[in-house]
Amino acid sequence: MGICSSSCCGGRARDGLYEPVLADSEREAVADLLQYLENRGETDFFSGEPLRALSTLVFSENIDLQRSASLTFAEITERGTKDARISDWSNNVDVREVDRDTLEPILFLLQSPDIEVQRAASAALGNLAVDTENKVLIVQLGGLTPLIRQMMSPNVEVQCNAVGCITNLATHEENKAKIARSGALGPLTRLAKSRDMRVQRNATGALLNMTHSDENRQQLVNAGAIPVLVQLLSSPDVDVQYYCTTALSNIAVDASNRRKLAQSEPKLVQSLVNLMDSTSPKVQCQAALALRNLASDEKYQLDIVRANGLHPLLRLLQSSYLPLILSAVACIRNISIHPLNESPIIETNFLKPLVDLLGSTDNEEIQCHAISTLRNLAASSDRNKALVLDAGAVQKCKQLVLDVPITVQSEMTAAIAVLALSDDLKSHLLNLGVCGVLIPLTHSPSIEVQGNSAAALGNLSSKGESTSPPFKHKLTKPVGDYSIFVQNWTEPQGGIHGYLCRFLQSGDATFQHIAVWTLLQLFESEDKTLIGLIGKAEDIIEHIRSIANRQIEADNEFEDEDEGEVVNLAQRCLELLGQSMSKAHIEG
């Protein structure tokens, strides 16, 4: 972008009239500027004499001088890329932090009625808006108002530059709320439907940048952006698809917005499912994440399955690209929450790939989502529990659980606890050696891991339905062989004995409840060796007596009910212990 000398020295205007003769200061500024441009590689245009020369042209009444100034600002803020999209300028421009002495002349030029001046000035401002500090200062100096006005220009180039500049400004957290309240969202939403793809890209990019906070998302919804974003999911342009998919994903974080989407956008789920087959990995990824956020609601959990979303999710889950795997497994986790989706997911052959993910990556999020999905799939039926076990889930958990992060341990132990609810699987689980990892995990620094591990041990110990476990499920059939509990009485790491003793004396009502309930199952096992070991464990008996003799205070009805159940269970344990000891004495 050069400066044509004829445009700087008066001459004949386009309407046939002569421009005013240049003032001496203007003529001098033009000469100086031409010289600076000859040595542009060594000139700092943002301070000193070069900036003063530019400012003289800016504040001139001569429109040609203003055009020259705006073109110069556009050129010096670029690095030789004349046609770069504003959304890409962060890769192509040589920008630096500037002060208000540089920005104010450009903002003045933005208010010009001349299209050429507007276009070049907004391009320069968009370049400078790549710098973090400049973003804030531009808004502080009132840059939004002229930019909004330019967005409504009939000139596409002006629109494109103005929208691109706002896109850059909207990447700074400090600016987002100001932009949302400035009146910019309405014009941005309208320009997102522009026939010019550059304008459309920049507008949808700006809308995306406004979706990162609750308040701004609400402003965006109020501006009517949702139907536009949904419509543009079918755009042929990959960038527009990406911006709209990501924006909708962020909008779907809010429950109130999901309700609006459910009421007004019946084609949304199918459009997102289709985009999971995009040739662009970033679009595929965001489509799956958008579906994941929608699947926070029951309606969408079912809708995604009905829209044939499982097969594309399985393909993404089996990808070698980590972000695709993560987005797909996060989505299927939410979908698997609905009981009606358990069998369709299993029948689509998700089990083995989910089990494989547990050991094929060190990514904590992927591991958590995978095992949580397996637990959800096992929740409703013994048949599904058996299929999860047959897929190798427990073997993989046993292999990994002592070495994975605590969050993954929590999910894995919870999954084992759910599988241990199946009467037909208890013996199988015990024979797989799960006690060997569950017992050490009752020492975990995590309360959740301790509780899940103890709950799993309790479920595995269940003899019958005479009592209800303290973890939401009623067990029905006996384990049968309790020899593994005998083998693990003191090992590993203190064994069953140590775990029970610690939980009984913990002071935590839930932990005491689990331990007393588990003890009752062991007493009801009728395994003489096991009952004999318990009877010789004076520390356990002492804690049981202490709980059985506890006085319940009538301060809190719900706590009293829970504590009363624990006391009753402890008293029942003592009764069975007394009967066992008496029987042993008689037989002896």
Image (cartoon, rainbow, N blue to C red):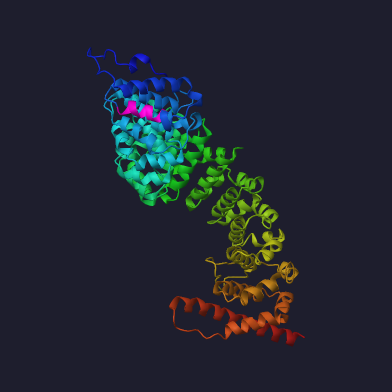
On the question of residue 414 being in view, the answer is yes
Viewport quadrant of the C terminus: bottom right
* Residue 233 place in picture, x, y as percent: 41, 34
| On-image quarter of the N terminus | top left
Query: Mainly helix, strand or loop, the magenta region?
Result: helix
Which stretch is magenta? 50-59
Q: Position of residue 300 (x, y in %)?
A: 42, 46
- Residue 90, x across and y down, in percent: 48, 33
The residue sitting at 38% across, 27% down in the picture is 53
> For this view, does 411 lie left or right of residue 272?
right
Q: How many marks do you count on the picture? A: 0
Magenta span includes 56 = yes
Question: Left of 541 or right of it: where is 158?
Answer: left
Furthest toward the right, the residue is: 588
In this picture, is 379 found above or below 6?
Answer: below
Taking the magenta stretch, the answer to whether it contains residue 175 is: no
Please indicate, yes or no, whether residue 240 appears anywhere in the rendered image: no
User: Residue at point 74% right, 75% down?
Assistant: 529
